[in-house]
Amino acid sequence: MLRNVAYAAAVLTLIASPAVASGDADQGKKVFNKCKACHVADKQKNRVGPHLVGIFGRKAGTVESFKYSKAMTEKGEEGLVWTEETMTEYLKSPKAYVKGTKMSFAGLKKEDDIENVIAYLKAETAK
């Protein structure tokens, strides 16, 4: 009986745990080539899109020197914070996740690409 309770608790813990990117940062760097025409990950320099330094834990639409779409600014005001989970959903389809975003990128279709680019961003922006 006690074994069944322990097993059930372990299963519930796994189910309730948030997904964590387990990607490959080196592969993510290659995937990021699709992004680097518009974004910089290693320094606070904006291009067509905002820099991504410190992206994780940052409220959406808040890089001071970047002019965001009204939709992205509103999402930030509503409480959207970039986490692995929110970034995963955004990278799948930016226009669906933030309707009205200026980001013209269609999204990444492969889960591995998304996990890898998140691993790269976490490694690169932590330097």
Image (cartoon, rainbow, N blue to C red):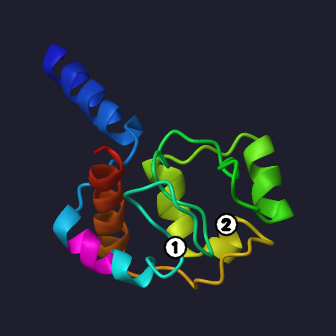
Q: Where is residue 122 in the image (x, y as percent from the top left)?
A: 33, 51
Task: Decide which of 32, 5 is in the foreground and name it.
Answer: 32
Residue type at numbered disc 1: Lys
The numbered mark at residue 102 is none
Residue highlighted by disc 2: 97
Residue highlighted by disc 1: 92
Is 72 magenta? The answer is no
Label 2 sits on a secondary structure element that is helix
Q: In this view, does 90 lie to the left or right of 73?
A: left
Q: What stretch of residues is rendered in magenta?
A: 27-31
Disc 2: CA contacts within 10 A as few (<14), some (14-19) or many (>=20): some
Give me the residue at 60% from left, 62% from top.
Answer: 50
Contact (Cβ within 8 Å) of mark 2 with mark 1: yes
Q: In the rendered image of this protein, does residue 38 appear above or below residue 8?
A: below
Task: State the residue lying farthest toward the left.
Answer: 3
Residue 24 in sight from this viewpoint: no
Residue type at numbered disc 2: Tyr
Residue 63 in sight from this viewpoint: yes
Label 1 sits on a secondary structure element that is helix
Task: Decide which of 124, 72 is in the foreground and name it.
Answer: 124
Q: Position of residue 20 (x, y in %)?
A: 33, 48
Task: Decide which of 1, 109 is in the foreground and name it.
Answer: 109
Q: In this view, does 38 lie to the left or right of 1?
A: right
